[in-house]
Amino acid sequence: MFLKRMAFMLGASALALMNVANRAAADLPGDYVSADGTISLPGNFRTDLSHIGSWFVPEGDASGFHDVFAQADAVRHFRAHGEFPDGTVLVKELRASEAGDYTTGKGVHHATPALKQWFVMIKDRKGRFPESAQWGDGWGWALFKPDNPATNVAEDYRTDCIGCHLPARATDLIYIEGYPALAP
Ligand code: HEC
């Protein structure tokens, strides 16, 4: 009985130590990553992050505006050092667009309330989650859909994401020409 209880207590403290070790190993990516590497969509990104730039895609599934956000601290760091600091969060929001005639001109495009999806990348300079298919090549990779914004539906960044980002390899897989706010 006593031995059993000792074994249980040892087991429990080993587990507690492992949790601490996991958190220490996971020490990073701020508030949007859990100890096991699960990425969540920063719910408050429109007010708490800085808008660093937008893309306009004229046609296809991804058509509309792609608005990109990052932490103000990450922007300041990039301006000073030319690289994204550990824990940088990039959120790309896709919105449908409409065009109309305005006092500025004809066929003026604006975003609509219709949300398509959110892409998220989180900078990981330490390779913290080598077992995860959502982490690698220096980033965590996530995709959230409006019908379930709580769940990352990107299964494997190697098939879901990186192929399209390889042209931007020289700039850490990020299309930085779209983000004039990062210029010094
Ligand atoms: C069809 C190609 C394609 C796929 C697939 C793709 N991306 Fe991208 N992504 C791009 C392009 C091109 C841009 C910049 C221009 C734009 O948005 O049209 C971009 C921009 C981004 C940005 C803004 C930062 C940057 O790199 O400019 C994030 C964040 C992002 N993608 C994350 C992801 C994640 C996560 C996945 C996988 C779940 C993914 N992308 C899959 C092509 C793609």
Image (spheres, helix red, strand yellow):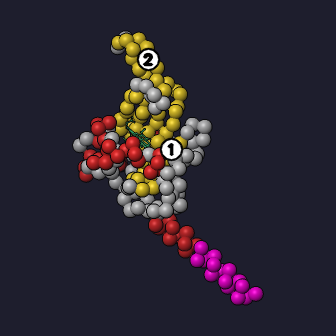
Q: Do the residues labelled 2 and 1 touch (CB within 8 Å)?
A: no
Q: Which of 134 and 3 is in front in this view?
A: 134
Eyeballing the image, is 47 above or below 4?
A: above
Whether residue 47 is visible, yes or no, is no
Question: Ligand 1 falls in which quarter?
Answer: top left
Q: In which quarter of the image is the N terminus?
A: bottom right
Residue 83 drawn at (x, y percent): 29, 51
| Location of residue 174 by image quarter | top left
Residue 19 drawn at (x, y percent): 55, 69
Q: In this view, does 148 lie to the left or right of 143?
A: right
Marker disc for residue 88? none
| Location of residue 52 by image quarter | top left
Q: Is residue 8 magenta?
A: yes
Q: Mark 2 points at which residue?
A: 99
Eyeballing the image, is 9 above or below 109?
A: below
Among all residues in the image, which is located at the extreme right? 1
Whether residue 125 is visible, yes or no, is yes
Q: Give the range drawn in magenta.
A: 1-15
Residue at (59%, 73%) from the top-left corner?
A: 15
Q: From the Cβ of disc 1, is ligand 1 less than 8 Å away?
A: yes
Residue type at the position of mark 2: Ala
Marker disc for residue 143? 1
Specify the principal SS of the magenta part.
helix
Helix, strand or loop at label 1? It is strand
Q: Quadrant of the C terminus?
A: top left
